[in-house]
Image (cartoon, coloured by chain):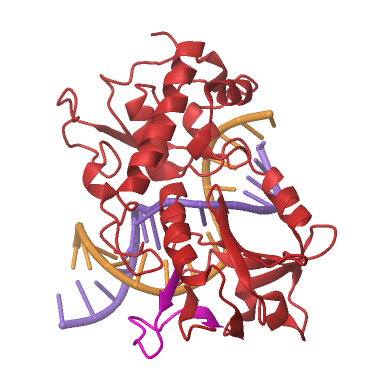
Chain colours: A red, B orange, C purple
Amino acid sequence: MPELPEVECVRRSLLRHVQGRTVSAVALFRRDVARSVNARGEDRRLPPRGAEFQLLEGVRIVDVRRHGKQLALISEPPRAAALVVHLGMSGQLFCLGPGAPIPDPSHIHVRWQLDTGARLFFRDPRRFGGVWAVPGPSLLEKRWADLGPDALTITADELAARLGRTRRAIKSALLDQRLLAGVGNIYVDESLFAARILPSAISSSLRAPHVERLASAIRAVLTRAIDSGGSSLSDGMYLDADGRQGTYQLSHSVYGRGGQPCPECRTSLSTGLLAGRTTVWCRRCQGSGARR
DNA sequence: ACCCGCACCTGTAAGC
DNA sequence: TGCTTACAGGTGCGGG
């Protein structure tokens, strides 16, 4: 579900609740959604004892950071442990005041009690997401270095260097989190439409002006989506930490609009499968991109 | 290196 | 009204 804009909206709304707060208690309802990371950076199961401490129990949270689609709750120095949260397809992080009823208590896997009396919940029906206890800032950096640069601030030069090395379809390359972090199936189609580039164009054959247009389209689309609070689709699964929906779905040009008229030229939008994902584009507006 | 299919899960919507 | 099927915002694996 959540791509970079949704994750950024969760980050901002979450930060208002947790920054400077101490976690008084942690309840882990499903152990298999949580992993701990060892000193070598490898994923391990949570230890049988002390798991709550790894999940920030007794610790003061000083920041919430984001890289691509991943979030990290950062604890106070000198320990500066991180709790990385992946929302997967259906994950939610939300806060409720003391005594406030839980809208839907099913599939809640972790609960953090804060010193304000508020509670933070990790809920994830499909369980493609999870939490990772990372014991220190250098290990978080190392983990995030395996991802590509953050898509919100991607420059044409960085993108050109990465796309120049591969002959994959541009859509497939942009979805690869090791190449570029944060873009998923909604925003890749929206960005390629905005840049007038065909999703199947060969990455390394894009010329400098196209890559420039693409980098600025990615930044612009993601920025506008964040300003709209992200995309909340009909199943209503994406909500920020305050339970609020976004409205960017109302501004989608192509995603979810196959067969409808192109917002630019009224040609019926094409639908197909690329990189194993449903792909929507305008065959008239998005020329080969590599040649125009 | 790259692509595909599939697997991991649950919920929802569409089709019969 | 069922029951069945397809599909969904993500990622990772094995095989060709």
Of all residues, the one furthest to the front in this rendering is: A20
Vertical comparison of A204 with A46: above or below: above
The quarter of the rendered structure image containing the C terminus of chain A is top left
Q: Is residue A290 left or right of residue A102?
A: right
**Magenta stretch, residue numbers:** A92-114
Residue shown at 35% from the left, 65% from the top: A237
How far across and how far down the image is residue A94, in percent? 43, 72
Residue shown at 43% from the left, 33% from the top: A219
Vertical comparison of A97 with A183: above or below: below
How far across and how far down the image is residue A144, in percent? 67, 48
Residue A150's image quarter? top right
Residue shown at 25% from the left, 36% from the top: A253
Vertical comparison of A268 with A230: above or below: above
**Magenta stretch holds residue A292:** no
The quarter of the rendered structure image containing the N terminus of chain A is bottom left
How far across and how far down the image is residue A27, in percent? 58, 86
How far across and how far down the image is residue A17, in percent? 46, 71
A285 vs A49, nearest the viewer:
A49
**Magenta stretch holds residue A107:** yes
User: Is any part of residue A139 visible from this angle?
Assistant: yes
